[in-house]
Image (cartoon, grey):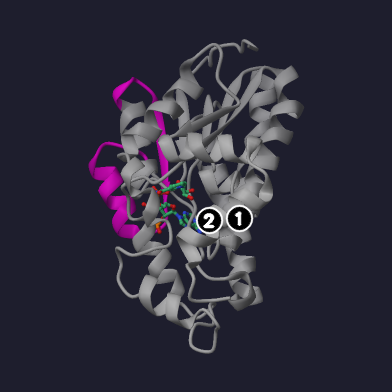
Amino acid sequence: MKRYPMVGEKTAVVTGASTGIGRATARMLKARGWRVFPAARSRTDLDLLRGEGFQPVELDLSDPDSVDYAAKEVLELSQGVIGAVVNNAGYGQPGALEDLSRSAVRKQFETNVIGTLDFTNRFIPVLRAQKSGRIVLVSSVVGRVVIPFLGAYSASKFALEAIGDGLRMELGPAGISVSLVEPGPIKTCFRKRVVSEAARGGLEMRDSVFAKQYAKELAGPERTYARPTDVFQKPPEAVAKKIVHALESRCPRARYPVTGAAWLGDFAARFFPARLKDRLLVSKVIGREVG
Ligand code: NAP
C-alpha cells in the first residue's frame, strides 16, 4: 500500500457541514485537534456552526462565484495552509432518467461533480507546494452500482469516482492522497431531501409511466427507492470515522465502502454480470407493475 507524508498542519475544509455526514465529520475532526473550516449555505447554519466554535465559510457549489469566494476565504483564514479538503456536499435527484428535465440533470452535475472539482482545484496548488495533503470525495454505493430512479444521482457519483481515480494518479507522485468514501444508507436528512427535490419541478411525475411509483415512493419524507437496504443503515459518524482514517493514516485507502450495502454494491459491481444486477434491482425497486 502506498505511504503518504502526514499533513504538516491539521487544517481541513469540510463541505456540506450544515447537517449529516459533513457536520459529524467537522465535529469529529475538531475533537481530534484539527482546525476545521466547515462550509454551509444558509445564514442560520453558518451561525449554528459559529456557535459551536468553528470558523465557517459560505459555499454554494452550484454557483461558480461562491466557489471562488469560499476557497479564497478558507485560504485567507488558514494563512495559505491546508492539510485536507473533504468534499462531502451533495444531494440526490430522484426520478427515472426519461422524466428528468435538462436543468435538473445540469443542477445535479453542477453541484455533485463540477462544483466539487472546481472547489478542490482551488487548493491543489497549495497542496502541491506543501508536498503533502489529503483530498476526500464522498461518493456513494450508487457510484458503483446504478439504482433505478436515482440514475442522475448515480451518474454524478460515477463521475465523482472517475474524478477520484484521476486525481489520485495525478496527485499521488506529489505526496497528495485522494480517497473516495462510498457510503451505503446513512441516517441523515439525505432521503428527506431526495423527496423535496422531486417537488422542485425538474421531474415529470404526473404524465410518467412511473406515475404510480412516484405517488407511492415520493409521497412522504421517509420514503425513497433505497429502502430495501435499510437493514444496513448506519449513523453519520460511521462515515466520519473513515474520513478521519483517510486524513490521518500514513496509508490512506483509495476507497472506503461504509455499511454492508456498500460492500455488497462494491462486490456486485466487480463480480456480478449486468443481467443479474439488473434483475435484482428491477425486482426490488421498480417491481412488476411497469413493463
Ligand atoms: P444531508 O444531510 O442532506 O447533507 C447534505 C449536505 O450537502 C448539506 O450540508 C447540504 O447543505 C449540502 N449541499 C447540498 N447541495 C449543496 C450545494 N449546492 N452547495 C453546497 N452544499 C450543498 O446528506 P448526507 O447524507 O450528510 O450527505 C452527505 C454526502 O454523502 C452527499 O454527498 C451524499 O451524496 C453522500 N451519501 C449519503 C448517503 C446517505 O444515505 N445519507 C449515502 C451515500 C452517499 P444544505 O443544508 O444547505 O442543503
Residue 270 percent coordinates (x, y): 65, 35
Q: Amino acid at mark 1?
A: Asp
Element marked by disc 1: helix
Q: Is residue 208 left or right of residue 41?
A: right
Relative depth, front residue between 278 and 177: 278
Q: Marks 2 and 1, Cα distance to the nearest angstrom? A: 5 Å
Residue 146 percent coordinates (x, y): 59, 53
The span picked out in magenta is 31-55
Element marked by disc 2: helix
Relative depth, front residue between 4 and 283: 283
Relative depth, front residue between 100 and 82: 100
Q: Mark 2 touching mark 1, by CB under 8 A?
A: yes
The residue drawn where x is 39% and y is 42% is 22
Q: Amino acid at mark 2?
A: Leu
Q: Is residue 199 left or right of residue 93?
A: left
Q: Which image quarter is the N terminus in?
A: top right
The residue drawn where x is 56% and y is 58% is 153
Q: Quadrant of residue 173?
A: top right
Q: Which residue is mark 2?
A: 281
Q: Which mark is residue 130?
A: none
Q: Residue furthest bottom?
A: 207
Q: Which mark is residue 278?
A: 1
Residue 149 percent coordinates (x, y): 53, 65
